């Protein structure tokens, strides 16, 4: 009898622990059934031609823009039929810069990171949309390392790692990262 009572107590404690383990207070751990895909990021050359890179003239204090083409897709397209809850609303982006070898000291050898918000761009599952964003702030051209390029023939080539963020219709976070080469110089 004692063994049966002890076994029942152990089972009761295990059942309670399993129940409590299912109560996760971290809402962000829930996953979206949707994913955001960066199809492409394009910049422009100094003459204004669209290119798979961006040429940034550091002698001007004009911000440089780029364009990303983003797509919303189902993670498992055969599992469920898409609904409005699977659509993705873009909320913002963050750019970090590195040298070509993956290193870089923000504000010293590469521009400092930047963040931006997005308007309420909604991307429906299966749809691609283009969004313009600021890839180089005008203020970045007035500080290191870009200001040191003014009046010289030196060039600085960096990779911009652009992470777009958003939420699906159930408010689950989604993100995707793409890259754009940026060539800085006094053109």
Image (tube, helix red, strand yellow):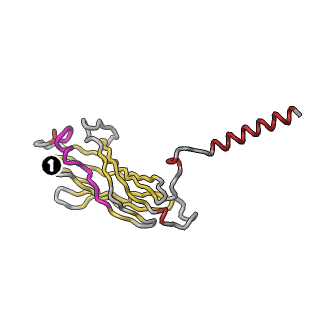
> Looking at this rendering, what residue extends furthest in the right direction?
1
Whether 30 is drawn above or below 8: the answer is below
Residue 44 occupies which quadrant of the picture? bottom left
Tell me if 126 is positioned left or right of 179 in this view: right
Residue at 67 percent across and 44 percent down: it is 19
Question: Percent x, y for residue 114?
Answer: 29, 45
Helix, strand, or loop for circle 1?
loop
Decide which of 124, 97 is in the foreground and name it: 124
Q: Quadrant of the N terminus?
A: top right
> Looking at this rendering, what residue extends furthest in the left direction?
151
Q: Residues within 10 Å of mark 1 (few under 14, many from 20)?
A: few
Decide which of 98, 4 is in the foreground and name it: 4
Residue at 81 percent across and 33 percent down: it is 6
Question: Percent x, y for residue 171?
Answer: 46, 55
Whether 41 is drawn above or below 111: the answer is below
Q: Which residues are magenta?
A: 131-146
Question: Percent x, y for residue 167?
Answer: 43, 55
Question: Within the magenta stretch, is there residue 141?
Answer: yes
Tell me if 35 is positioned left or right of 39 in this view: right
Question: Percent x, y for residue 183?
Answer: 23, 48
> Looking at this rendering, what residue extends furthest in the top direction?
2
Whether 17 is drawn above or below 120: the answer is above
Q: Which residue is mark 1?
A: 61
């Amino acid at each position: 009898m004692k063994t049966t009572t002890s076994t029942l107590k152990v089972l009761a404690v295990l059942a309670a622990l399993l129940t409590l383990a299912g109560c996760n207070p971290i809402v962000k751990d829930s996953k979206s059934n949707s994913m955001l895909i960066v199809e492409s990021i394009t910049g422009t050359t100094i003459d204004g031609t669209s290119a798979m890179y961006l040429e940034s003239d550091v002698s001007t204090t004009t911000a440089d823009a780029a364009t990303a083409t983003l797509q919303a897709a189902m993670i498992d397209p055969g599992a469920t039929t898409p609904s409005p809850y699977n659509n993705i609303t873009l909320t913002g982006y963050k750019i970090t810069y590195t040298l070509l070898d993956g290193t870089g000291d923000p504000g010293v050898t590469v521009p400092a990171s930047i963040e931006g918000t997005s308007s309420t761009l909604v991307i429906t599952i299966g749809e691609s949309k283009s969004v313009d964003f600021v890839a180089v702030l005008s203020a970045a051209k007035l500080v290191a390392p870009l200001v040191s390029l003014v009046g010289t023939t030196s060039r600085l080539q960096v990779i911009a790692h652009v992470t777009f963020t958003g939420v699906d219709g159930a408010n689950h976070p989604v993100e995707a990262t793409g890259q754009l080469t940026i060539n800085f110089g006094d053109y």
